Image (spheres, grey):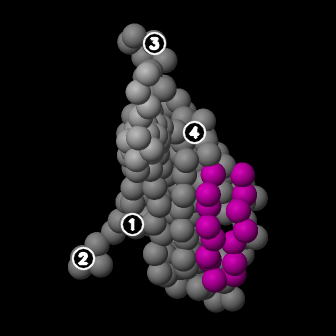
Amino acid sequence: MKSIPRYQLLALVLVSLTSLAAASHHHGPPPPTPRILAFDHMYGVDGPFVGDANAIRGIPGDELPWAVAHFIRGRLDTEGHLRIEVRGLVFADKPSVPPELRGKNDESEFRAVVSCLTEQSESEVGMSNVTTAGFPATENGDADIDAHVQLPNPCVAPIVFVIAGSEDKWFAVTGFESEND
């Protein structure tokens, strides 16, 4: 019986180990979970949305107007992971707001609501609102919301709200108002 030279044996072992490592290694990180909604702005409750008269998806606006002094941006993925970066969600500088509250947030926490339309049956559409726990908010109106919510299946026409930590009234909702009007 003829023996295999050492260099050929070593080459065969190296090729086998390389093939095994390549077969067990993924080609990069897994793809990100698909987004169903991403936003770079929200609309602070104002005008006809203040109070109970014109609730959106069953959620009334706060009884005083709010403004987004800096920005609110976020994303929601198909697994219900919701991230919202809130910077400067404060009472608006309007005559209806007491002077001592203007430009401030008086809530210690903000929560988020994801509102979806969903199928109730083959012929009926319903609404599902899912609320996060509270996240700390500063007097300057800053907060970071990072939560997982149980989305209905299907989740159609999602809307995201930032609401009070202490009551179910919204301060901001996905949308915008042009500064040009």
Residue 25 percent location from the top left of the image = 46, 43
Query: What span is colored magenta in the figure?
Result: 133-147
Badge number at residue 129:
4
* Residue reaching furthest to the top: 122
Identity of the amino acid at label 2? Asp
Q: Residues within 10 Å of mark 1 (few under 14, many from 20)?
A: some
Q: Residues within 10 Å of mark 2 (few under 14, many from 20)?
A: few
Whichever of callouts 1 and 4 sits on the residue coming sooner in the sequence is 1
What is the quadrant of the N terminus in the image? top left
Badge number at residue 181:
2
- Identify residue for label 1: 40
Identify the secondary structure beneath mark 2: loop
- In-image side of 55 versus 104 (left or right): left
74 in magenta = no
Evaluate whether residue 26 shows in this view: no
Which numbered disc, 1 or 4, marks the residue closer to the eye?
A: 1
Question: In the rendered structure, are the residues bearing label 3 and label 2 in contact, judged by CB atoms less than 8 Å apart?
Answer: no
Residue in view at x 39 percent, y 66 percent: 40
Q: CA distance from mark 2 to mark 1?
A: 20 Å
